[in-house]
């Protein structure tokens, strides 16, 4: 086993930029794919969040854009499912890049205002560390709706 | 009505005035007879213009001329060719492509009509042959239209993901393209990179057997494919999960070139290449698609036979005016370190207690903004240190810890200011020395006389190489060798043949538990008295630790548990020996141009007549610029001492 591990290590070094692509190429899309089932050293993080989003790849380019995330879910929900770790941290801080990007997806013209409002409702949006992305998405939308001034700034809500 | 809509929507590309086009297309619905006529007309025109030999056509189908003057496309998927002989015949492929423009029959695999499957070929032909679109059959190209809309490409950036020695496959870095979307620009003009798209080229790994893996990559039996993916996936993967800094090179392309590039990416989405590790890898193909859209760039022309990611960024910089801006995206580790530096010594201690002992008592007494800064640092720390745990679906100890810290942070109700991290110029990958190196040296060994020496390195860097662009304390060498010529008696001798050498020093800090390690595989001359200067197959290395003795890691001290398995028929007692012992050393970056190291290694060998070996080494290197350096080394082995002075050239 040790030998095999070492061989993998040595040979995969030859690969230059090869393995990066494999993350998405074979295991499908999503960060869940970062964990290879048979690659030592990396744990399995096969998020079912990601797995059930993969539909058959008939056409790599289309599939990569559309298959990675379930087409039927909202743009914000897709974003939340992949960026969750960073986004949740941003919301607890009331600012940050992922939060600003979410603000753009929700067509909110004032991301600072959105940040403060979401930060205030942090406990409501992230009740547990396993709350699904769709639930988070819904809570964010209700937070915006219930904040009159903020609702005016976000064109996608209404 | 649908037809008029179609004409209107494609009006951007029309050459006729709108009204005229509309009228003409309605009145003269192309009959099959006039279509055949028009097809012939286009074929004649294409022939007259010698389009099959046009550089853009050759680039679009990825033809490369071979030794006998013929052509062969690098693309290996059959669906990419309209003609059965398309892979080797640019003329037939062009003819079949023009024929295909008149076809409404979808390809069985891609489920698309030729014109929709090959929009870049069509765009180019349309422009150069001045094709009157209404004279072609009507096609909606819905999927392609959706793709174009999804990308809404405004500009293009080449992204370099920096070296990451702890994961072997990324030791050489990685490159991809970012297609910057107009949809990512908010009303205030701010560009949200996360909402752009990344175009990645890579192999589909189909084996977990390392040997099959290695040979598949060298022989090109893996399939390489282009994938388009939201850029945030790439940021999360590289910046956060692997803690690698990203460097971006904004490219100056015309809107027409960008349109063609997007169309070409679409064309490649349905096909594949045979993937070769060093020749047709991600770096090469980022260039090959840019060239397909903009032949003027001639990016692959001057590339050496093999390329690795850092070659691409250096090559980009040599095209005048191509790179308009270089920008830097710090990894989660860099962000954490930056936040840590913002804490004063008292706050640092409170932070350390908070992290190590989960002790919050001292935190609560602090003013809110100070608490916020400490908690912000803690959050980045947890993300960096436990990236894998955080991606798990189920609740874990780390996840619930971070959950609690975030709740605590949110309760403060303070907004964190934007983190401003300046670009570390010393790490700029495009500024680094070339990865290929040739060495010419002169030296002498005690009792053996003098020698001349010539060495070559295929790739990439060692920790004494000076200048910017690489990790401090990182050696990644692949295929390197050294031959000596002795004057008396006159003979050549192989000194060293390295298949692979990896040496990574990641200093330990209070908050970083990185391990340092060394791995070396190849063959080298045995310098102790267990054989008469024989060459032995050699595998050595092991884990260890290093510490930084100065700010900015200028001085690193390290210790490695250094194991060795060596094989040589010439060993006096037994052809295989196994040894182990400590390797201790220090690496000192005196200035950006001058580095020195000293090391001492002791090993005890099994299956060996002389059980103990000792080797010490002092080496210094001065880099004049990114091309030339001079190196001086002293080494002392069990029975010999040697000194050598060499000049080094990098490209």
Image (cartoon, coloured by chain):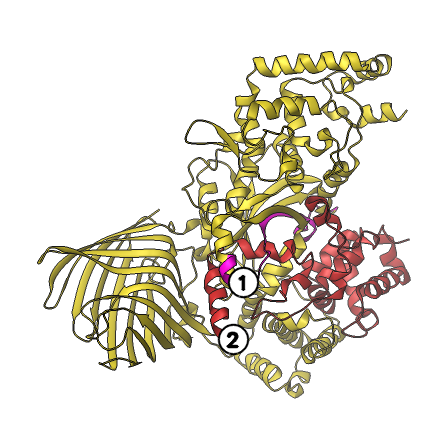
Chain colours: A red, B yellow
Q: Where residue B292 appears, x then y in whole percent?
A: 57, 33
- Circle 2 sits in a helix, a strand or a loop, which is it? loop
N-term-proximal mark, 2 vs 1: 1
Q: Where residue B24 appears, x then y in whole percent?
A: 82, 13
Q: Residue at x 28, y 79 (%)?
A: B602
Mark 1 Cα shell of 10 Å, populated few (<14), some (14-19), many (≥20): few
Observer-nearest of B136 and A109: B136
Chain ID, mark 2 = B
Tell me which corner region of the image, top left, top right, bottom left or bottom right, holds residue A33. Answer: bottom right
Q: In the drawing, does residue B441 fall left or right of residue B362? A: left
Q: Where residue B446 appears, x then y in whole percent?
A: 12, 68
Visible in this render: residue B177?
no
Answer above or below: position of B243 versus B109: below
- Circle 1 sits in a helix, a strand or a loop, which is it? loop
Q: Residue at x 21, y 73 (%)?
A: B637
Q: Residue at x 51, y 37 (%)?
A: B322
Q: Where residue A94 appears, x then y in whole percent?
A: 73, 65
User: What residue is pinned by disc 2?
Assistant: B512
Observer-nearest of B326 and B36: B36
Residue B193 lies in the magenta stretch? yes
Q: Which mark is residue B209?
A: 1
Tell me which corner region of the image, top left, top right, bottom left or bottom right, holds residue B559. Answer: bottom left
Answer above or below: position of B287 versus B649: above
Where does the magenta region start and end? B187-213
- Mark 2 or 1: the one toward you: 1
Report how far apart the C-alphas of labels 2 and 1 lie in the structure.
32 Å
Q: In the drawing, does residue B96 fall left or right of residue B628? A: right
């Amino acid at each position: 086993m040790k030998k095999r591990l070492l061989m993998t290590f040595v040979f995969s070094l030859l690969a230059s930029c090869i393995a990066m692509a494999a993350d998405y190429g074979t295991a499908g899309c999503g960060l869940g794919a970062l964990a290879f089932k048979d690659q030592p050293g990396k744990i399995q993080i096969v998020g079912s969040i990601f797995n059930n989003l993969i539909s058959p790849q008939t056409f790599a380019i289309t599939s990569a854009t559309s298959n990675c995330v379930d087409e039927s879910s909202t743009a914000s929900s897709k974003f939340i499912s992949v960026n969750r770790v960073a986004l949740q941290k941003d919301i607890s801080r009331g600012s940050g890049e992922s939060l600003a990007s979410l603000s753009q997806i929700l067509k909110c013209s004032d991301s600072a205002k959105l940040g403060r409002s979401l930060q205030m409702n942090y406990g409501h949006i992230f009740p547990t560390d396993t709350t699904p992305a769709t639930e988070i998405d819904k809570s964010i939308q209700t937070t915006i709706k219930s904040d009159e001034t903020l609702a005016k700034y976000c064109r996608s809500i209404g | 009505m649908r037809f008029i809509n179609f004409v209107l929507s494609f009006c951007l590309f029309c050459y006729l005035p709108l009204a005229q086009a509309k009228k003409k297309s309605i009145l003269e619905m192309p009959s099959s007879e006039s279509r055949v006529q028009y097809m012939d007309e286009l074929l004649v025109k294409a022939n007259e213009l010698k389009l099959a030999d046009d550089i853009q056509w050759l680039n679009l189908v990825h033809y490369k001329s071979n030794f006998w003057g013929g052509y062969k496309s690098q693309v290996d998927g059959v669906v990419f060719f309209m003609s059965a002989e398309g892979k080797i015949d640019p003329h037939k492929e062009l003819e079949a492509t023009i024929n295909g423009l008149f076809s409404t029959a979808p390809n069985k695999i891609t489920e698309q009509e030729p014109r929709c499957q090959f929009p870049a070929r069509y765009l180019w032909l349309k422009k150069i042959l001045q094709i009157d679109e209404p004279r072609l059959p009507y096609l909606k190209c819905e999927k392609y239209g959706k793709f174009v809309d999804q990308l809404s490409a405004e500009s293009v950036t080449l992204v370099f993901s920096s070296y990451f020695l702890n994961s072997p496959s990324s030791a050489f870095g990685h490159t991809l393209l970012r297609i910057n979307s107009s949809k990512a620009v908010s009303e205030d003009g701010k560009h949200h990179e996360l909402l752009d798209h990344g175009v990645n080229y890579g192999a589909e790994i189909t084996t977990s057997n390392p040997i099959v893996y290695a040979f598949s990559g060298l022989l090109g039996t893996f399939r390489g494919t282009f994938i388009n993916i939201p850029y945030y996936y790439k940021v999360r993967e590289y910046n956060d999960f692997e803690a690698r800094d990203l460097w971006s090179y904004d490219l100056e392309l015309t809107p027409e070139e960008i349109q063609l590039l997007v169309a070409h990416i679409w064309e490649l989405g349905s096909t594949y290449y045979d993937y070769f590790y060093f020749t047709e890898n991600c770096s090469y193909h980022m260039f090959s698609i840019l060239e397909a859209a903009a032949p003027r760039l001639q990016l692959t022309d001057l590339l050496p036979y093999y390329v690795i990611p850092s070659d691409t960024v250096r090559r980009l910089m040599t095209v005048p005016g191509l790179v308009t801006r270089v920008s830097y995206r710090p990894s989660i580790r860099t962000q954490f370190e930056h936040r840590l530096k913002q804490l004063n010594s008292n706050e640092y201690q409170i932070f350390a207690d908070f992290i190590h002992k989960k002790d919050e008592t001292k935190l609560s007494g602090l003013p809110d903004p100070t608490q916020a800064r400490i908690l912000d640092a803690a959050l980045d720390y947890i993300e960096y240190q436990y990236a894998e745990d955080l991606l798990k679906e189920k609740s874990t100890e780390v996840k619930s810890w971070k959950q609690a810290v975030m709740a605590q942070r949110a309760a403060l109700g303070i907004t964190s200011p934007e983190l401003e991290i300046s670009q570390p110029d010393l790490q700029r990958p495009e500024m680094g020395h070339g990865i290929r190196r040739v060495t010419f040296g002169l030296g002498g060994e005690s009792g053996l006389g003098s020698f001349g020496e010539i060495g070559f390195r295929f790739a990439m860097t060692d920790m004494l190489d000076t200048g910017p662009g690489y990790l401090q304390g990182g050696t990644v060498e692949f295929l390197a060798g050294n031959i000596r010529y002795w004057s008396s008696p006159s003979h050549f001798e192989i000194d060293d043949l390295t298949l692979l050498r990896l040496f990574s020093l990641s200093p330990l800090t209070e908050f970083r538990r990185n391990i340092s390690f060394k791995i070396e595989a190849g063959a080298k001359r045995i310098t102790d008295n267990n054989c008469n200067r024989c060459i032995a197959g050699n595998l050595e290395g092991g884990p260890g630790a290093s510490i930084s003795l100065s700010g900015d890691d200028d001085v690193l001290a390290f210790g490695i548990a250094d194991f060795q398995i060596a094989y040589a028929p010439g060993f006096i007692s037994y052809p295989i020996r196994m040894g182990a012992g400590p390797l201790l050393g220090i690496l000192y970056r005196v200035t950006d141009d001058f580095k020195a190291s000293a090391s001492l290694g002791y090993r005890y060998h099994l299956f060996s007549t002389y059980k103990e070996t000792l080797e010490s080494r002092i080496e210094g290197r001065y880099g004049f610029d990114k091309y030339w350096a001079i190196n001086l080394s002293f080494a002392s082995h069990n029975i010999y001492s040697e000194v050598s002075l060499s000049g080094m050239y990098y490209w």
